[in-house]
Amino acid sequence: MFFFSFRKCKNGNKRNKTELERPRVTFRTRSELEIMDDGYKWRKYGKKAVKNSPNLRNYYKCSSEGCSVKKRVERDRDDSSYVITTYDGVHNHESPFTSHYSQISFVQPDAA
């Protein structure tokens, strides 16, 4: 399951069209792992306690130079078997996973 939205100003109004809109996408995934591999490299820059939740929220920035995408990762407060991952922004580069594997041929040679 995922959700897609645009950021709003702190006062609740949508931003002006002249301002850069950064899409926000949220995934809710059942997983025992806290960090799931999404093909990008991330640098953790913070964590904090979340109101009405026993779980911490972790904050990450994309480690690619010039990319401003951020993500937050936290356990669902109602069912801790789910991880909620929220991406804020759009990457301005390819996934390192995509560029690495695009050079590999997955076609098997003809059997002789």
Image (spheres, grey):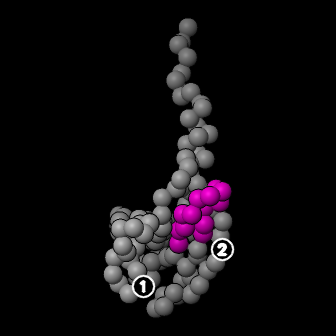
Left or right: where 18 falls relative to 41: left
When asked about the image quadrant of residue 19, the answer is bottom left
Per the rendering, the mark at residue 10 is 1
Q: Quick check: is 25 in the magenta stretch?
A: no
Q: Which callout, 1 or 2, points to the residue nearer the camera?
A: 1
Quarter of the rendering occupied by the N terminus? bottom left
- What's the residue at 55%, 79% (across, down)? 57
* Identity, as a three-letter code, of the amino acid under mark 1: Lys
Q: Which residue is mark 2?
A: 45
Question: Which range is magenta?
Answer: 60-72
* Identity, as a three-letter code, of the amino acid under mark 2: Tyr
Tell me if residue 33 can be seen.
no
Q: Quick check: is 63 in the magenta stretch?
A: yes
- What's the residue at 59%, 31% (across, down)? 104
Q: Position of residue 67 (x, y in %)?
A: 59, 59
Q: Nearer the viewer, residue 30 or 68?
A: 68
- Secondary element under disc 1, as helix, strand or loop, is loop
* Vertical placement of residue 18 versus 98, above or below: below
- What's the residue at 66%, 65% (across, down)? 43
Left or right: where 111 falls relative to 27: right
When asked about the image quadrant of residue 55, the answer is bottom right
- The mark total stands at 2
